[in-house]
Image (cartoon, rainbow, N blue to C red):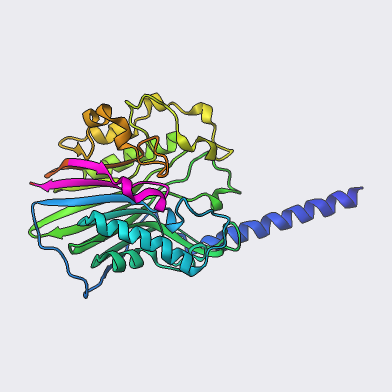
Amino acid sequence: MKKLLQVIALTFLTFLCLFIIFLLWNKFPMLPAKFKVGIIHLPDIKQNEPHGVIRVVTYNIQYGMGLEGRRTENLNTWDFYERLQKIADILKEINADIVLLQEVDFHSRRSNNIDQSYFLALKAEYPYIAKAPHWKIKFLPDFATHIGPLEHGLAVLSRYPLIDNESRVFKLPEEAPFYVRWLYSPHGGQKTVAEIGSTNLTIINLHLEPWAQKTREKTTLKVIHWIEELKGPIVVGGDFNAIPPEAPLKTYTNLEDTPWFIDKKQWDLENDITINAFRKLPTFSAAISVEAYLKNEQESFTYPANHPTQKLDYIFAGKGAEALKGYVFKKAGPASDHLPLVAEIRLQ
């Protein structure tokens, strides 16, 4: 019996050591918390002439899956091309000057190694691409046969020159056990600068934590501090994964997708600070104001795309930029699980 216990203990320790080695190998080299990323220029695509009012769109594209597909499907390259082409057509119809994208894959096995930011820029005719990966691993067992490397994050497409680009990787929820953290997608932020005539517009692209409220709130406060340190006009947008504080229904549509280690009883959505923190920034205005939201709540819903029941996506502007108006582009339909949010921004 003693020898059997020794064998079991030795086997367990061996497995544990191998698992730790695997985790270190899988993330090596680990992405730093903050790092610069180069900008891609497509010289054959014409850039826009500068003007005082620009159009900005934020769109979580769910790495090209779309609500019509299932994650367990073994989608081939042409399946993804078809889905991404739908998103490109949507972007062409919106005709924004600057596009903020979330949940973008760059050369990931699960999406057949397509650089989705490059594909969308090419098809929707955007000459500048700024990528901001915040999740990069060598091995991801992601349903069906989609097993292999993954690089995933944010991207900004622009019809104006981009002159700077930085990616930030946000911390994972403290609740996540060490043995599942490698499977939990970290969220992130991106800062890039668009040169619009003589004006440098700073763009903050965000994808915030969906389920761990305390983690999201801590990240939000860090982002607010980040914004406060910046000079000149700023546009902040993305998938904030938080409902407006005045929303009558204080719950999430994606409640059933919450990981098992997140204690939903700890949620306090009535006192969630995420959205109000951005609203309290001096000089900042929202694409869809509180008054407009309360007047017709359903017109502001962005999720889920096939039957929207809540607002999770936002655009704010300040410090010399003003959000004049905004709307949800409902024609996008189930090309993703989110609908695009569009804003008209005046540069002062």
- Please identify the residue farthest to the bottom as the structure is shown: 44
- State which quadrant residue 49 falls in: bottom left
Q: Where is residue 2 in the image (x, y as percent from the top left)?
A: 90, 48
Asked if residue 264 is positioned above or below residue 316 in the image, the reply reads above
Which residue corresponds to the image point at 22% horizontal and 31% vertical from the top-left?
A: 292
Count all numbered tags in the image, as a single digit: 0
Q: Give left or right: position of 121 versus 180.
A: left
Q: Position of residue 146 (x, y in %)?
A: 56, 62
| Residue 230 visible at all | no
Q: Give left or right: position of 142 versus 267.
A: right
- Please identify the residue farthest to the front as the structure is shown: 331
Which residue corresponds to the image point at 44% horizontal and 67% vertical from the top-left?
A: 107
Which one is in front, 173 or 289? 289
Which one is in front, 53 or 124? 124
Q: Give left or right: position of 253 versus 238.
A: right
- State which quadrant residue 228 falls in: top left
Q: Is residue 318 magenta?
A: no
Which one is in front, 132 or 105? 105
Q: Position of residue 345 (x, y in %)?
A: 16, 46
Which residue corresponds to the image point at 73% horizontal and 58% vertical from the top-left?
A: 14
Q: Give the range drawn in magenta.
A: 325-347
Q: Where is residue 51 in the image (x, y as percent from the top left)?
A: 8, 56
| Residue 248 visible at all | yes
- State which quadrant residue 296 falls in: top left
